[in-house]
Amino acid sequence: MLSTLIELQRLKNLDRTGWTLRGLPNGTESVAAHSFGVSVTAMLLADKFKAHGVSVDVEKVLRIALLHDWAEARVGDMPRTATLYFGSEARKQAEMAAFSDVVSEVDAAKGLYANLYNDYEHRSSLEARLVKAADVLDLLVQVLALERAGARGLDEFWEVAEKPEFNLEGAAEQIVRELLDSILKARSEFT
Amino acid sequence: MLSTLIELQRLKNLDRTGWTLRGLPNGTESVAAHSFGVSVTAMLLADKFKAHGVSVDVEKVLRIALLHDWAEARVGDMPRTATLYFGSEARKQAEMAAFSDVVSEVDAAKGLYANLYNDYEHRSSLEARLVKAADVLDLLVQVLALERAGARGLDEFWEVAEKPEFNLEGAAEQIVRELLDSILKARSEFT
Amino acid sequence: MLSTLIELQRLKNLDRTGWTLRGLPNGTESVAAHSFGVSVTAMLLADKFKAHGVSVDVEKVLRIALLHDWAEARVGDMPRTATLYFGSEARKQAEMAAFSDVVSEVDAAKGLYANLYNDYEHRSSLEARLVKAADVLDLLVQVLALERAGARGLDEFWEVAEKPEFNLEGAAEQIVRELLDSILKARSEFT
Amino acid sequence: MLSTLIELQRLKNLDRTGWTLRGLPNGTESVAAHSFGVSVTAMLLADKFKAHGVSVDVEKVLRIALLHDWAEARVGDMPRTATLYFGSEARKQAEMAAFSDVVSEVDAAKGLYANLYNDYEHRSSLEARLVKAADVLDLLVQVLALERAGARGLDEFWEVAEKPEFNLEGAAEQIVRELLDSILKARSEFT
Amino acid sequence: MLSTLIELQRLKNLDRTGWTLRGLPNGTESVAAHSFGVSVTAMLLADKFKAHGVSVDVEKVLRIALLHDWAEARVGDMPRTATLYFGSEARKQAEMAAFSDVVSEVDAAKGLYANLYNDYEHRSSLEARLVKAADVLDLLVQVLALERAGARGLDEFWEVAEKPEFNLEGAAEQIVRELLDSILKARSEFT
Amino acid sequence: MLSTLIELQRLKNLDRTGWTLRGLPNGTESVAAHSFGVSVTAMLLADKFKAHGVSVDVEKVLRIALLHDWAEARVGDMPRTATLYFGSEARKQAEMAAFSDVVSEVDAAKGLYANLYNDYEHRSSLEARLVKAADVLDLLVQVLALERAGARGLDEFWEVAEKPEFNLEGAAEQIVRELLDSILKARSEFT
């Protein structure tokens, strides 16, 4: 179990390449800090879903959010453009294999973790789609914070907000879109 | 809900003062990265507890782990020595009040969050004690990683390992102590 | 005496949390760098006071400026919001106690230092009020420099400039306000 | 041509993941700084080759050294472990395709650049093998510098020095091995 | 030869003072990263010169580009204003002497390197003037990248673009000016 | 007066090149942070001098300590080796001229500041020599702190401690040497 913790420790100072490739300073955001942001966003969303009658397994949500980037300890934080050259299918398979190796020393629950990771990659469950929405929303809140602090040149990150594909339904979809709208509104107030 | 997310975003580049006050570079570890480490450690511990017959509410564990440092968005990451001057009771009350204000805009579950935070501060439940153990263990794995990378002058962090007070029982206590022992053993291999 | 110097050395890479909590990079300004800025500003102000006939003890001014943030070596650079939760009186008492411990190994002049610190905290003398003005002005010049370099989201720091309370008199008050006005004018030229 | 220069500009603050994944601070070495080191090392080696009668095309050497990491502007600095999961052949093809796109706007010499890149990837020429040797040697001199400054935990980088495979011949092989030996000797003096 | 490589290694984390003195974060650009940028720009320019019938010695171009800042390992990256106080002749002589000492342990080609450095300092050849143009253009592309990412206060760097003195001729001058114009045009699109 | 403050602001993130040229991270210590350390050390020394019957003008000490590095805002923090190439006399003259320009907008006391700077450069007074001693001692306490945190390769900084030339007398010399000895003793305890 220790070897897994040591390996995941690496995510604490692995830079998210989205920022450094656009000229922002090293240390802008680590993969671990992003995973924290996704997990927190997912928890708040899940609780709002429940308050509006959407049944959701919060434990599952939080598990997926916490583990969805573990493969990066072995393959790094590949920029989006990398997917063009490797192909998204090859990338998924490589990350799945890397994930399996990261958790190989975890006796208790490695099968569970692999299933959750697989679920996330295929967006098979409501919980997986919720975490994906949280992943997008945490990214946008980060961009918002960076832009408020003076960063520019990040317009392309907002393109995802034009045609969002959360693939949720009913109240869930509405809650996520309302949050997205409030992010866009907050941005419009200073640009 | 957005105002809460924006505020928690701040934890992503709030330095843990334990490192900077000891001469390590700015950016060594953010509060958000630490919270991620605690959450991951707590999940792995909880699953091992369950595998050894200890009944534990994993959802509650993950919720507590994710929110236990939110107050720092308003009071900062106070160094340990600060507690000597404010008093631990005053510090707890201030952080409880700060926590309440951080979540005040979260309609759905702010009562739940406050209860979980309160539970953690008083170590009222097994889940709270498990997260506190994860908090200590993530700190030690971070120290281990820093020392492996060449950092020195961090001996005082290891004192907690001499008389650990996890206040767990049976298999739970044993699992945590075994992990602590494996950390100490890993350290002995390069010092 | 060495133990005090070692402890004050810590201020050299303790980040001012005002910047990191607003999304600026780690390492933007250390407490030591700020203390240098305050001391330099205080010296220039004091010399201008004297040139305009205001009697001021420059040695006392410089001593206060250099030592006014020493307590942060033990309590950290608490963000402003922290004062809301601890209360300003508790914060002052804690910092006074921390300051006393920082200088406890200084045989020669620890009583003198404690008196000067106390004087500063209560703004008892002209010299203390001059240093407080320098503290505000160095902050604003730093914000000006950051904004010139592209930083944004720092508007709240300028609020202090709307109703400044320097509590000085005659030529002293006028000199400080003229400097404040020139800062505001410099800012207006690029915003 | 400008679009290519802007894209290569990104390499100036893209961190080499080998360091950050091992706990060294963000900003330890950029891909651009490494490429500079490789180019300089290659020039010095090539001139020594020539002085010892080995015929080598220095222009070709420098061209290859300067361009050998350009693909990383699109695929990032993938850690070594990533190759295990993608396969070295897939990685090579992806990087070749990324390289082609990076230089697609360069009218004058894009065919030449692609040929040189291809040559390097297949180690087809003496010049390509010389640059590969310089790539390894710059890495080791960097590790040496980091270890001298106190970094630890970098032992695995030295494994390459145990069974070096430069695939050079005669005086060329000897010159490279002598430099390698002098690096190892310099290391032995402080460990 | 190793002592030279170790010394040049220092350029990898020597900050360009032009940025830090204007309030940009430490680590914005190292001297090594800049030298990489100049070398790459020089290669692309040289190949375009050749495509337009200008005869140019590319090997010489790349050698000069790679070594033109080596003296900074001993004298640092002096800000422009420093030249006002030392005098440009004294600065040149000091850097020439520092350069000679940097390469003093390089048996094979130190005379060649000194000649190339001398050539560059006096802009004696087309190749030297081409590298100087690349030095200016890489600076402007870096400023462009920083401004796109939100940096401000860098206007003075653009003054060089108003009355450029490349001292090239015919097609060479035209190619360089076209690149300069495209940089200015790219800047006009976001300011 | 504002233009001077803005210019001195630059010292807050101008790196001391002694660290970065030896492979320590950017941001290790700014010139402003060092000036703070020197000023604080000088104040403590001066007060100890007085307690032992040595008459010293503390105001003068603090003024010199605060302003002794202002010229670096225009000439940068030149590494020691730079002096070899420029000559120490030329360096002094350049820095004196830069200093004069930095304070040229300060009406009140620019003559006084120039005299104090001149005094420091020539070590004309006890106060100047005291500040020079503080400059050396703050450097060594910084090295001590870096080494405690794991930094290595800084041995050459300790050479100054072997044949210190403080040029003080009687109790003053003894106090400074005792502090030096206590620094050396502290170092011997962990190396």
Image (spheres, coloured by chain):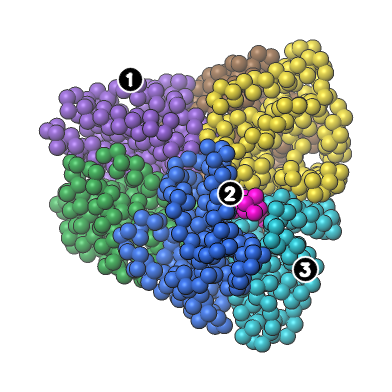
Chain colours: A yellow, B brown, C purple, D cyan, E blue, F green
Depth check, mark 1 against mark 3: the one in front is: 3
Residue flagged by tag 3: what amino acid is it? Asp
Residue shown at 71% from the left, 69% from the top: D132
| Mark 1 in CB contact with mark 3 (< 8 angstroms) | no
- Residue hosting label 2: E182
Q: Position of residue E77 (x, y in %)?
A: 44, 59
Q: Position of residue A54 (x, y in %)?
A: 80, 15
**C-alpha distance separating marks 2 and 1:** 48 Å
Sort mark 3 into few (<14), some (14-19) or many (20+) by Cα contacts within 10 Å: some
Question: Is residue A8 left or right of D90 when viewed as pictured?
Answer: left
**C-alpha distance separating marks 1 and 3:** 69 Å
Residue shown at 40% from the left, 26% from the top: C158
Q: Give the image quarter of residue C184.
A: top left
Q: Please, what is the dominant secondary structure of the magenta stretch? A: helix
Residue shown at 24% from the left, 60% from the top: F121
Nearer to me, D169 or C30: D169
Residue shown at 48% from the left, 40% from the top: E152
Q: Is residue D9 magenta?
A: yes
**C-alpha distance separating marks 3 and 2:** 32 Å
Whether residue F61 appears in this view of the structure is no
Q: Vertical placement of D181 versus D32: above or below?
A: below
Nearer to me, D86 or B65: D86
Residue farthest to the front, as pictured: E170
User: Residue under mark 3: which chain is it in?
Assistant: D
Residue C163: mark: 1
Give, as a single range, the part of the protein colored magenta: D1-20
Q: Where's the N terminus of chain E, which quadrant?
A: bottom right
User: Residue under mark 1: which chain is it in?
Assistant: C
- Residue hosting label 3: D119
Disc 2, SS: helix
Residue flagged by tag 1: what amino acid is it? Lys
